[in-house]
Image: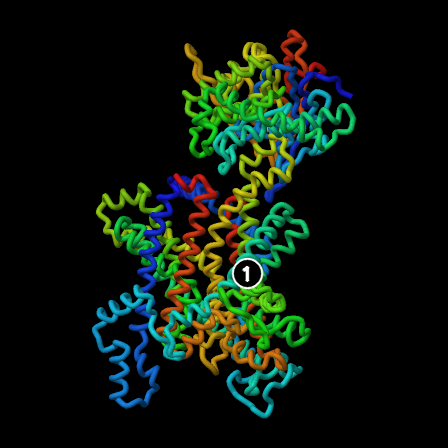
Amino acid sequence: MQYRRGDLLDVSNLRVVFDTYAGQVKALNGVELWMNHGERLGVVGETGCGKSVTALSVMRLIEEPGRITEGSILFEDKDLATLSENILNTVRGKDIAMIFQEPVAALNPVMKVGAQIVENIECQRKSAVLAQGARKAGPVTDSGLSQKHRTKETGSVEIMRDMLGRVGLDWQRTENLYPHELSGGMAQRVMIAMALSSRPKLLIADEPTSALDVTIQAQILNLLNNLVRETQTAVLLITHAMGVAAQFCDFIAVMYAGNVVEYGSVQSIFKNPLHPYTKGLLRAVPKIGRTDELQSIPGIVPDLISPPSGCRFHPRCPHRRPECDKNQPRFEPVREELEADRHHVACFLYQKDL
Amino acid sequence: MKRTSSAAGYAKGSSWKKFLYERKPMMDDMKHSVYLWKKTPLALIGTVIIVLFLLVALFAPLLAPYDPIATDLSRKLEAPSAAHPFGLDQFGRDVLSRVIMGTRIEVQIIFIISIISITIGLIVGIVAGYFGGVIDEILMRITDIFLAFPRLVLAMAFAAALRPTLTNAIVAISLVEWTVYARLARAEAIKVRSQPYIEAIRALGASDFKIMFFHVLPMSISPVIVQLTMRMGTIILTAASLGFLGLGAQPPLPEWGAIISDGRSYLMNNWWITAFPGMAIAITVLGFNLLGDGIRDILDPRIRR
Amino acid sequence: MELGSFIIKRLALMVLVIFGVLIIVFIVTRIIPADPVGAILGGNAPPATVDAMRHQLGLDKPIFAQLLDYLGGLLRGDLGTSLVSSRPVLTDILEFLPATIELAVSSIIFAVVLGIILGLLSAVFRNHFIDHFSRVFSILGISLPGFWLGLILILIFYYKLGWLPSGGQYDMFLFPTRTTGLILLDAMIHGEWNVFWNGIKHLILPTFILGYSSTASIARIMRASMLDVLHQNYIRTARAKGLPRKMVILRHALKNALIPVITIIGLEFGSLLSGAVLTETIFAWPGLGRYIVNSLLTLDYPAVSGGTIFIALIYSVVNLAVDILYAAVDPRMRS
């Protein structure tokens, strides 16, 4: 039994595959990451490295033909990887909320946005009542449940309006609009209002700004920053931009081809990147005042139907060793550094017993 | 000398390699299509049915055991037997032979209707889509008018006005069927029209006709053909319906719908005259529909993934 | 507001199309037929009779004058006189219309309800037994010739089993009171329950035959549309809210999946009217479809013209209604 690493979320050895016509895509190959209450973790990597799959797996939103084959997703006291769909639904939306890359497409086109937020608030109320009832193990009478629900229902619309205000939208103008009448930025604000309306413990933001204009991106990130700071909500931010992650997060997990190859505090990753892939990524980030040439990482992202053996980065790695294509490197703490930095890396260059 | 030739060989090889490399996505795409085809058993069954149907039509005179028109009133309405598996009709004609010879009529129907309706549809659609504006508006409103009739009702009216014969039924169905392809071709023409290369060609002085014929037409043909495959079943059903109503092929032509119409009066005691040609229609239409479904699925980007 | 202007635009377009329909019907019934008079009088009539007939039908006038006569008559509600029944065509049509409406309505209800349910179950339980069943049922529905299947069902359920009648709207020994012309409705109004049940029995086979191919098409579209919708991002959002699967499907997926189905219902109504021609012929159903077929076979051009115009009119109105419904359901359509 592994010891518990983060008191909010601890994902270990998470493996996800997609069965397609062409073969089995091994999308996640033993992902490791964890976080405590109120922390912000950024997951970075190239397109197709499994960041979004990781995010969706945490909510168990992976759809056919995808499935979780191995690993655990400990959230507080539950393992989301094995939880029944019914109990999972009391966690989804209530304890963990999610916002997505394309906010307009993420909203139901035939439902007014106000109603979509209210639906979430009410759904979480029901979940709360159910969860409470289950905890007390006492009988929850039907009338009691609906009574409680009804009295609180009056408040849902007010909460919705309050949330719209908090994300900088005028509820009078917004609540009766349909998603296609919103700009991308507005739609993302609505999504944020919806996600935070239930005061979740963890917000998963899957590339929340990638589809938006650059100026809007900064606004949305600032908004998100202020809102989650107020409520001390933990954030799992999926992004392909190292800069965004560094700015917004406390910790960073670097993913490559279905693995977290390096994990640690923002300082430790930026000051002392260890994995050759992380180094490569950082060399590819433009910075003001930087005089050296930007460098790209040679080679292409591997095909995950027949991924490279051993370390999946070895075909592109400038420091390749003989053992690299034989075994998968263990994900291990970097001992020289402070424990608070949680610096971990999966690379044979740093394995102590070799 | 040797050196140059090997260099040339190398260059040739590399250009060949380059050629292959550039076309790799296309080749992979085709391989993928074939792969999906094999993976879709229903499309395969449809293909087999249609191939059989065409083979029967091709060798019909050899396959038909008896003369489909020769009557023998002494043996009329004989039930199916080993000698006459589908039985005999009210004039003592062998139903099996009539059904087999009927395949030729169905092939003829499909072939001519396809050609006429596609030609009209492509011309109307491409002209409307390419020129746009008033021309488009007028042509599309005319199309709308044709679409305002339930298809069979309009085909019936045309067929009757032209005098009911097989040829006129074919013309009538074509006059109804072209609207489908006109709309498709128009959509395609609008897409092509706005491509930058068309503007470039026009700037080089190509005439409208040339652009439509050499650039817009080739792009429009493949979606139209795909659609046609999917509509084959409906076309056969419409033709058979006209035949059944007495507005298409006339006796003694062994058109399947007309045979069913013949058998209708003898339904209670002599079901075979009705049952077998109907099954022939059903199987053929099923074949075309399965094939059409298969083609649609294979071309569907959502399923392709 | 926007919906209102949409309806007006759509209405204007419909008027234009109906005018075109009238022209086409005119061409089909007056210009293409080489010799309508010969068709009426037979080949060997004396020239004087032929001329008199031509004059009586207005065929001696120039074509434009004929067109104006025809359009003028239509405006006054005069569709001409049937050459067979010698009654005004409009009277004939109004007598036969209710039977067609009854059959078409029961068939479209059958097709829409069964089609949507089958398509929905098929998509939700993809690759399960119900999906396979529904797909086989659907592909047969669009492949089997309805007129043939109708005959086979008559053979089985009337001749062999004797469970259902072979045709007609009700048994000949019944004399229902007519008010609206819709047999079932009239029977309910007048409390003639024996007529009502008799009518239902007569309606079963024609409804199934007429509705089957539409059921199949609707089920196929519904399945495809539902599968498509279930992969949309907003469904993922709904699941992320923690809504139970049933709620995700009923509240978020269903309405979106129905949008393309609504369009197809309009088109299906067209094929339903086409099918009515065949179904009414097979089941001796006293409706407009059978009237048109008989008129075509007897070369009763005024009747053909009137019947065809009526059918096209019904179809256009239904399509208009479907378009409006579509705009009402999908907020994206309005802007």
Question: In the rendered image of this protein, does residue C311 appear above or below residue C173?
Answer: above
Query: Residue B305: x, y in percent?
Result: 54, 42
Q: Amino acid at mark 1?
A: Ser
User: Which residue is depicted at the point 46% across and 65% down?
Assistant: C274
Question: In the rendered image of this protein, does residue B86 appear above or below residue A14?
Answer: below
Q: How many marks?
A: 1
Q: Residue furthest front?
A: C190
Query: Residue A212: x, y in percent?
Result: 44, 26
Q: Is residue B263 left or right of residue C263?
A: right
Q: Where does label 1 land, which residue? A: C106
- Residue C10 visible to the viewer: yes
Query: Residue B248: x, y in percent?
Result: 44, 75
Q: Nearer the viewer, residue A101 or C119?
A: C119
Q: Nearer the viewer, residue C157 or C186?
A: C186
Query: Residue A8: x, y in percent?
Result: 67, 18
User: Which residue is depicted at the point 63% across and 79% down?
Assistant: B85
Circle 1 chain: C
Q: Is residue A295 left or right of residue A25?
A: left
